[in-house]
């Protein structure tokens, strides 16, 4: 039986049908958060892993944080994991998808969480004990830094602790964390993630 790879997308970018309000939203994303959103795109990670050794589970959710749907989705995910708690689970998350995964794992009875790889993570600080997590971050990802400060103010901007490996990638915006992004002359972001999933 194949290992399960659960892929979780982040929140949808804010938008408005009012052209003046949309201009304001676009201005804030671009000039304040260093983020250029694209709308109505399919998750690129599902496609690149579709022919991999994993059994792919794409966790689709509303993508809305107003009203806040993250806790509801994490509960749904924990119930999904609990259906087969002895399976081997890997996670690939984007942005606030990290919080959905970490929260769901805490609520579940799963015994074989192998690894969580979080791309540009937005998540509450917590202590990771029973599985390993790799956080792919960038100093240029102003959007994720801003989101973490806004969403989790009671944690006073602390980082996660425990079985965590932080990998800082230079000069990548939040919207540039895509499979074919060249992180150096010889390696794409996808190749880095595949290596980490294989323990390299």
Image (spheres, rainbow, N blue to C red):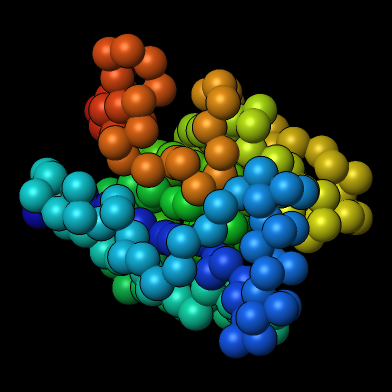
Residue 163 visible here: no
Pick the front one: 2 or 6: 6
Pick the front one: 130 or 70: 70
Residue 36 location (% of width, % of height): 56, 52
- In the picture, measured across the screen, residue 159 lies left or right of residue 180, that is right
Pick the front one: 34 or 145: 34
- In the picture, measured across the screen, residue 48 lies left or right of residue 187, that is left
Q: Quadrant of residue 66?
A: bottom right
Identify the residue shown where x is 56% and y is 44%. Answer: 174
Q: Quadrant of residue 151?
A: bottom right
- In the picture, measured across the screen, residue 168 lies left or right of residue 30, that is left
Q: Quadrant of the C terminus?
A: top left
Is 142 rendered above or below residue 134? below
Residue 89 location (% of width, % of height): 32, 51
Q: Quadrant of the N terminus?
A: bottom left
Most extreme residue toward the bottom is 17
- In the picture, measured across the screen, residue 69 lies left or right of residue 153, that is left
Q: Quadrant of residue 181?
A: top left
Is 120 rendered above or below residue 189? below
Identify the residue shown where x is 31% and y is 65%. Answer: 42
Identify the residue shown where x is 50% and y is 48%. Answer: 175
Residue 161 visible here: yes
User: Total marks drawn?
Assistant: 0
Residue 9 location (% of width, % of height): 44, 61
Identify the residue shown where x is 90% and y is 45%. Answer: 156
Residue 169 location (% of width, % of height): 53, 24
């Amino acid at each position: 039986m194949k290992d399960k790879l659960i892929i979780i997308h982040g929140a949808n970018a804010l938008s408005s049908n009012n052209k003046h309000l949309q201009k304001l939203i676009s201005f804030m994303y671009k000039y304040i958060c260093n983020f250029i959103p694209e709308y109505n795109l399919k998750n690129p990670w599902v496609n690149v892993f579709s022919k991999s050794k994993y059994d792919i589970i794409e966790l689709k959710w509303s993508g809305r944080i107003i009203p806040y749907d993250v806790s509801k989705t994490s509960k749904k995910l924990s119930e999904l994991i609990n259906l087969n708690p002895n399976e081997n689970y890997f996670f690939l998350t984007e942005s606030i998808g990290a919080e959905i995964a970490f929260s769901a794992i805490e609520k579940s009875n799963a015994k074989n969480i192998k690894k969580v790889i979080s791309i540009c993570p937005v998540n509450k600080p917590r202590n990771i004990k029973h599985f390993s997590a790799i956080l792919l971050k960038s100093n240029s990802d102003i959007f994720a830094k801003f989101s973490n400060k806004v969403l989790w103010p009671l944690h006073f901007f602390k980082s996660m602790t425990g079985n965590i490996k932080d990998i800082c990638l230079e000069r990548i915006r939040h919207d540039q964390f895509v499979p074919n992004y060249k992180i150096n002359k010889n390696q794409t972001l996808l190749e880095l993630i595949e290596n980490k999933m294989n323990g390299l």
